Amino acid sequence: SRDQHPLFVILGASGDLAYRLLMPAIYRLYLAGHWHSPVIGFAPDDWSGDQYKDRVVDGLRQFVEEFSEDRWTEFQQLLHYQSGELSPDGLKPLAQKVGDSAAIFYLALPPALFGQAAQGLAAVGLSKSASAFRRLVVEKPFGHDLQSAQALREALHQGWQEDQIYRIDHFLGKETAQNILVFRLTNRFLASIWDAEHIRSVQITYAESLGLEGRWRYYESAGALRDMLQNHLMQLFTLTAMDPPSVWSADALHNHKVEVLRAVRPIAADAVDHAAVRGQYGPGSDGHRTVVGYRDEPHVAPDSRTETFAALKLNVDNWRWHGVPFYLRSGKRMQRDYAEVAVQLKEVPRGLFGAGLRNWLVFRMKPDERIDMVVWAKEPGLTLKTRPRVLSTPYRRASEMEYSAYEQLLLAVLQGDRTPFPRYDEVEEAWRIVDPVLAAWKTGQPEIYPAFSVGPSGQDRLMDPGTAWRRLG
Ligand code: BG6
């Protein structure tokens, strides 16, 4: 029935997101046998159906390694195009096409248009159907601070119910993110150590060697704190720190996620320097290539204070985590692509086999996905010396299929599974946490760090005595 294969409507079908990410992911799902939905591309461009298909196939040839001309011939029969503006008038022909079918509306639009598009769809009756579901998909940024995030929520909620809205934070489609909870909650030996009695600190790092990649228009007004920490790293933090829900349902999960976010101690305006550090990459070289500093990137203001590195220290005021700092950091033009969630255990009592012996449990995301456990063992030989060993396993077998985060999340939207999509209150709590830092960073300057380095030296001041940031691999 049509209900099993809902229509998938892309608003902004002529844009970059649809071209580079969305259509390739849909096509890969199709190749894997998971996609059967008709796609209706919607955009202001006055294109014919064939012009739209030409544009799509151009992207697929570029971005899908497994592209096959034969499969394209079948796949393209699913593609339709409707031109129009986002106004109610412009959306009417779309409403006629959709009729009373089940439908998903993906806003592949600039964020400034989210509210208008959501309301336009509702105005022509597309947010409701007596006989079939209607879903709305939006992708970050969800506002640029708490106030604008609340305004966006209100705009979306005019015409749409919260349980129709799927907010994409693509990190929640990543295997490691999904595995954090599974690993935590299926391994008995972790249950009793997952708290302040046994864990000393948690470090979440997402380092990228990439620079601005031509995204100045967005990035200049965003910066690393908004681009990475408020959303992606905050989600990794949440999954690591939340209490286990008792059932696997979206609302139970989101309630528990919100609860731990609420427990994050507010950062006082006069204490921002103790809780947050910003940096901006200067020129540098990795031995193979020399790159310009951020301020010399095309279109960037020569005195830009946009941070390309941000680090945060979070304290969680609840029974489980009292006294355990959570460190989050992410930067561009860093030494290497390296990402992990690293949990540091407290040291064992000194005296027997040496002082300061601690375990780490590390969920590594980049350069490869693996789980590492750093343990101590006797060094073979005639004395009772210890040395660290790493119990390590790659996350995926070489033969196992690798899906991108988009594929995982699109499938979840089709299935009506809301677990991997942040609820509005998660988003807003995350803004509540970073807002004081954003306010403080309206003045002053980021520390310049050399491109391809470990970031600003100022990040060390967040560390408690006796702790240090982990090396980037
Ligand atoms: C995006 C950010 O959300 O995430 C980018 O806007 C960043 O700046 C990207 O590079 C990182 O995610 P991934 O999955 O590409 O490593």
Image: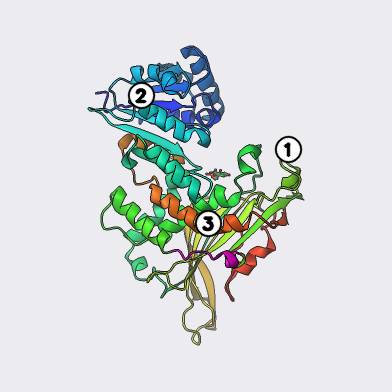
**As drawn, 72 above or below 332:** above
Placement of the N terminus among the 4 image quadrants:
top left
Q: Residues within 10 Å of mark 2 (few under 14, many from 20)?
A: some
Whether residue 370 appears in this view of the structure is: no
> Where's residue 224, x and y in %?
60, 50
> Where's residue 84, x and y in %?
47, 19
**Mark number for residue 298?**
1
Whether residue 194 appears in this view of the structure is: yes
Between residues 432 and 330, which one lies in front from this camera angle?
A: 432
Left/right placement of residue 458 relative to residue 94 reads: right
Give the Cα distance between marks 1 and 2. Answer: 42 Å
Comes first in the chain, label 1 or label 3:
1
Residue drawn at 62 percent across, 65 percent down:
273
Residue drawn at 48 percent across, 19 percent down:
69
Name the residue at the bottom extreme. 351
The image quadrant in which ligand 1 is located: top right
**Element at label 1:** loop
Q: Which residue in the structure is indicated by mark 2?
A: 124
Location of residue 463 (image quadrant): bottom right
Q: Are marks 1 and 2 in contact (CB under 8 Å)?
A: no
Q: Amino acid at mark 2?
A: Val
Q: Are marks 1 and 3 in contact (CB under 8 Å)?
A: no
**Element at label 2:** loop
Give the Cα distance between marks 2 and 3. Answer: 37 Å
Asked if ligand 1 lies within 8 A of label 2, the reply is no
Write down the region rendered in magenta: 264-272
**Element at label 3:** helix
**As drawn, 75 above or below 357:** above
Between residues 136 and 320, which one lies in front from this camera angle?
A: 136
Give the Cα distance between marks 1 and 3. Answer: 28 Å
Q: Which residue in the structure is indicated by mark 3?
A: 434
